[in-house]
Image (cartoon, rainbow, N blue to C red):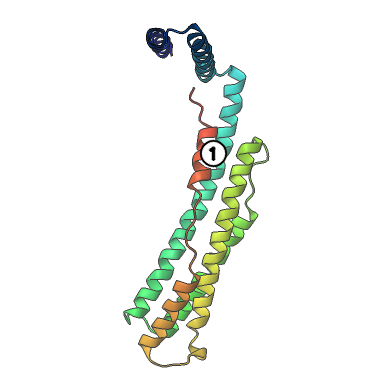
Amino acid sequence: MIWMKVAGAGLIVLMLFLVRRFFPRRGIFAIFCMVLLGVGAVLFMTQEEKTTPMTAAEREHLSEQQEMVVDWYSEYQGLIDQMDYNWQQYHRILSDFDADIIDLTTAWERLDELDGAALSTLDALSRMEPPLALDDDNYDLVTAIILKARAYAGAQRQTIRHTADAADPEHQITEVQEEQSRRLRDVMRSESPAGLFTAKEILALRDNVDTRD
């Protein structure tokens, strides 16, 4: 921006004046001038590079990248929504059994059914691949996001499956409902995935395909 260049030039002049006033020796003044002018030149060139508008070809290419990312992300977000729903249902089943709203057999049947839904989500993520026409940086970011989502979905599905196994009415070591519920909670606490941390990659991907100058 022009005003930033003017302000920068004014600041350089002021600093030269102050150095000349407080450091009258020519050697020190000359060295400082060279350093200051060099820094100013670098800053001005950097600013010029940042404000250089994209060409029509560059904008078209970026728009194509953005379109591919948007299409992919729409499908990806749908699978994330499925995982969130599965996880909500999982905790609801455990809460209902803990509160004695449902019996052990019902909890087991619902967990077993939920395991099928979690497996379906995991399978869909396992088939997902980045768009082949993405630039290398964008392709790598999408790949990293998918791999993290697959790992999370796998851990989520494993937690649901092991909890369903622990709820199997045919393999109980106690008939006391409170102890059965505690056993299911123990599986949940020991095997639940910590979280899906993809914010860094998603933000970088968004910045890469931003079509604004």
Q: Amino acid at mark 1?
A: Leu
Q: Residue 74: x and y, percent? A: 51, 45
Q: How many marks?
A: 1
Q: Residue at x 59, y 30 (%)?
A: 64
Q: Residue 94: x and y, percent? A: 39, 75
Q: Is residue 111 above or below residue 35?
A: below
Secondary structure state at the residue bearing disc 1? helix
Q: Which residue is mark 1?
A: 205
Q: Residue 130: x and y, percent? A: 63, 45
Nearest the eye: 84 or 43 = 43
Q: Is residue 121 visible?
A: no
Lateral position of residue 211 relative to residue 22, left or right: right
Q: Is residue 114 above or below residue 54?
A: below
Q: Is residue 79 above or below residue 167?
A: above
Q: Residue 75: x and y, percent? A: 54, 48
Q: Is residue 119 visible?
A: yes
Q: Residue furthest right?
A: 132
> Which quarter of the figure has residue 5?
top left
The quadrant of the image that shows the N terminus is top left
**Mark 1 crowdedness (10 Å alpha carbons): few <14, some 14-19, many ≥20:** some
Nearest the eye: 164 or 31 = 31
Q: Residue furthest front?
A: 25
